[in-house]
Image: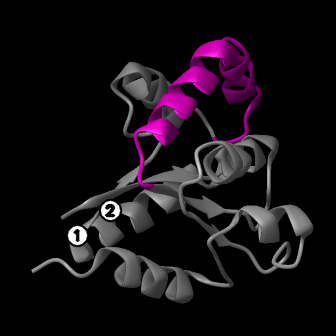
Amino acid sequence: MTKKFYLAHNFHIRKQIRKWELKMEGKYNVELDNPFYDNPRRAAEMDIIDKLKERSKEQRQYLLTRSSKSIVEDDLEKIRKSDGIVAFAQNLRVGTSMEIFFAGRILHIPVIVLTRRHKSHPWILEHAAAIVGNRKALEKEIEKRCGRRK
């Protein structure tokens, strides 16, 4: 059975996470739900954003036009429909922290956190089912929880 894990990560690493996500989905019985790319309501928006120069004034201005309410509600809905979350917390941002809290404290679903920097932080320790220090360890954790594809 395929498990669904929400991918909590910040906007600036979205492209590299997307490549990793597709590789993991091909290898393991997991569907990784990427809030930037796996959301039909945001597909056109992401096409526009990805065509703009990364971190440019134009990209920042476009990002300011988006509805914060719809972003947050979409993310919370995706987390509610997940079996757990995988959080990339090396360069932690507010959204990722909120998603970790919501999944771990409110929904009581497994939270796997990738971090070296925050591995002994009380809030991470309290809400993470597993803390890993690198992508290789994260991949092993996903394999343990979801199994390999046949």
The residue nearer to you, when weighing 26 against 130, is 130
Which of these two is toward me, 29 or 101? Answer: 101
Q: Is residue 66 visible?
A: no
Query: Which quarter of the rendering shows the N terminus?
Result: bottom left
Instruction: Decide: is 29 above or below 144.
Output: above
Q: Which residue is mark 1?
A: 26
Q: Quadrant of the C terminus?
A: bottom left
Measuring from the top left, give residue 107's x and y in whole percent. 58, 44
Q: Is residue 75 magenta?
A: yes
Magenta part mainly helix, strand or loop?
helix
The quadrant holding residue 113 is bottom right
| Residue drawn at x 56%, y 32% as measured from the top left | 76
Residue type at mark 2 is Leu
Residue at 41% across, 40% down: 37
**x and y, in percent, of residue 137 in the image:** 54, 88
Residue where numbered disc 2 is placed: 22
Is residue 37 visible in this depiction of the protein?
A: yes
Q: Residue at x 49, y 33 (%)?
A: 51
The answer to whether mark 1 and mark 2 are in CB contact below 8 A is yes
First to last magenta residue range: 54-83
Q: Secondary structure at mark 2?
A: helix
